[in-house]
Amino acid sequence: MKPLNLSLAHQRTDIEPRSGPGPLFLKRLPVGLTITGFRESVDWLDITVPPFDEEGLALVFLSYKGDLQIVLGNGKDLMQPISPGLALLSAGDKPMLFRSVTPVVFSAVVLFLSRSWIADFMKSNGNFEKIEQALQLDPNIVTCRLGRRQLSLLSSILAYDPGSGGNLLEIQNNALGLLEYFCCHRHRNLPGAGAGEAIGNEDDLSLIKEVESYISEYYCSDQFTVDSILKKTYTSYHKLNFLFKSIHGMTISEYIRNKRIEKSKEMIADNAKSISQIAYEIGYSSISNYILAFKKIYQITPGKYKKQISA
Amino acid sequence: MSYVSLENSEPFLKCFEVIAEDKSCIVSDSVLYFSGATGKGFITAAGIPTGIDILAVNVSMLTDDLTFNFLPSQSASSYILSFDEIGFPGKTDNELSLVSASMPGERSGSSVSITDSDYGKIVVYPKEREIRSLIVRVQKSSLGNLIPDFDAGTIQSIMASANSPSLNWPITFKYRLLINDFMAEIVQHPFRELFTIRNISILVEYLLQQFFVMDKLGKDGDYLSGQDMHNLSKVEQYLCANYRTEFPGVEKLSRISAMSPTSLKTKFKKYYGETLFGYYQKNKLEHARKLLDGKVPVKVVATEIGYSNPSHFTLAFKKEYGFSPWHYLNPQ
C-alpha cells in the first residue's frame, strides 16, 4: 500500500516552512487496520489525505485549534468550515484536503479499513451497510462528533512513538475504541462536513436550529442583540455560546458578525449602494465599526474591496 | 445436569442447539436466553472469521450445573482463554466476602486461564451461582492478529516450563470491570463484532501483562498452596467490593485471610503483583475513571468513591495516571 502523501504547502513566502513534515507514524495494526497520525503546529496548513491504492474506507479523527476548512472533491468545489473534535469517514479513493490560512495546531489520526477487512469483520452487519449507503450520497462523507473520552484516546494514540518501543497493542485498543464509537455514534450525511447534527442531544439541536433561523431573519435589524435571542429562547449566554462553538467553531456574536459581513459583501458586489448605506442597512450603528469588522474577516477595508472588484 | 461437548473446530453457536433442546430456552440472533424455570440470563456467541470465537456466559440461578467440554483436536490448534467470575447471587458485595469467608471449603472458582486446546478443556458452571464468564478460542495462527510481534514460542515455552497444559491466574478488578461492561452491552450492541474484538483485544493485553509478570514472580519464589490462594482471593474480593469506603487496614484484612499481616502482604504481592493498598487504590481510581467517562462532575466522583475532599482525589488520580481528572476530561 502506498503511504500517505503529505503535502504541507506554505503559500505565504514570508513564513519559513517547517522542515520535515510528515506523518508521525504509519503502522499496520495486528487486527489488520492501517493507522497514521499527524501532529502539526504550523502557520499555514494544506494537508491532503489522498487516494489509497487499495479499495476501502478512510476514517479521519480530527482535533485542532485554529481555523480549519475542508475541501472536498478535487479541491475546487465545496469549501466547508469544520468543527474541532470530529471524525470523518470517506471512501479511500476520495481525497480530502484540510486547509487553514491562519496558524493552526492540527492533529489527526487516520484509520484505513480495507475492503477485505470490512468483509471479515463487518460481514452482513446491517448497521454497517447503512453507513456505507449513507456514504454513497453527496458529499460522500459521514461525520461524527467526538466526545472527551474519544479526544483523550486520540491524544494517547498520537503520543505513540514507534522509535522508543511504544505499545502497539494499546494503540490498537484505542483505535478500535474510536472505530467502535464512530460506528455507534455516526450521524447521517450532512450538508457540508460537520455542522448541524454535531451535537447529540435532540433538545440542543432544535434549540440551535431555532436560534439560527431567528438570526437569519433578524440579523440585519439594528435592534437585534444577543440578549434578544436569550430572552426569546430562555437559554443562558454560556450555554448558547458553548453550543455555537462546538457546532460552528465560533461564538454566537462572531457568527452574527460573519453573517452580516457576508451579506454586506454581496451588497458591495451589487454595486448599488454606498459603503455607509450598507453599514446601516446590515445593522451597524457606526460605519467605523463596520469597517473594522470587515477588515477583521477579509483583511481589507470595504472601500478597497469595492475598488478591487469593480476594477 | 446438562452437558455440552464441542469439537475444537466447531463454532460455539452449535452448543446452543444442545442446551436449548435440554432446557426451556429461547434462541434469537445468536443469543440464548434462559427462561425463569432453569435459570436467568443469557449465553451468546460471537465469531470473527479470522479464527477467534467467543462464548459469553452471563447467567445466574441455574437449576443444574452446566458443563462445556471442549474436546481436543489436532486439526486446528488453538488456545482457550477463559475469564470466569463466579459469585453468590442475591448478596451485596459486602456480604459476599463474609459468606465466602464462612465457608472455608468453598472455592470461588473465579479465575483467568489459558489452555492449550490440544489437551481439551472442561468448564463447569455450578448451579445456584452468579456466573459471568468469557471463553475465547483463538487459533494459534491468528493470535498474531491480536498481538503485535507475536511470538508463539514464548507462550509455549512458559507453558512447558510450568509443565501443565493450562495456566491459571487470579481474576483482578481490571477483568471484572471489563467483563461487567461487556455483559451489559453485548446483546444489544449494534456492532457486535467490533465491540467483541475491541474487548478481546483489551483482555488479551491484560492477560499478557499478567502472563509475563506472573511468570517472573513465579520464578523467584515458591508456589502458594491452594488454601492460601483461596484466602487471598477473599481479600481481593473484599478490597474490590469496598472501594467506596476507606482502606480497611491490614489488620482487618489479615483476619479475613487468616494469615499474619506480614505473610498476607508478601503473599498478596506475589499473587496479584500489587501491594494491598496499591491494589485497592487502583481499583478505586478505575471506578472513578469510569464515572468520569459517564460525564459525572469531578466533585461528585470524589464523594462517590469515598473522598471527603475533591483535591485529595485529584492528587491521588494524578499520582496514579500522571494527569489530573480535569486534564483527563480536557485532553488538549
Image (cartoon, coloured by chain):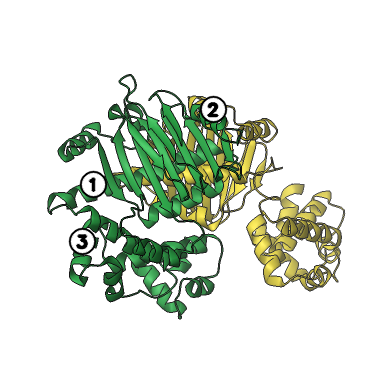
The correct choice, above or below, for A45 with respect to A252 in the image is above
The correct choice, above or below, for B313 with respect to A71 in the image is below
Q: Position of residue B278 (x, y in %)?
A: 30, 66
Rendered residue at 45%/56% (across/down): B88
Considering the image in quadrants, where does the N terminus of chain A appear? top left
Residue matched to label 1: B212
For badge 2, the amino acid type reads Glu
Colour of the chain lettered A: yellow
Distance Cα–Cα, label 2 vs label 3:
45 Å
For badge 3, the amino acid type reads Lys
Residue matched to label 3: B267
Q: Residue furthest bottom?
A: B309
Q: Position of residue A300 (x, y in %)?
A: 66, 58
Quick one: SS at disc 3? Answer: helix
- Label for residue B45? none
Quick one: SS at disc 2? Answer: helix
Residue matched to label 2: B17
Chain of the residue under label 1: B
Circle 2 residues within 10 Å: few <14, some 14–19, many ≥20: few
**Left or right of A155 on screen, residue B278:** left
- Which mark is first along the chain, 3 or 2? 2
- Which mark is first along the chain, 1 or 3? 1
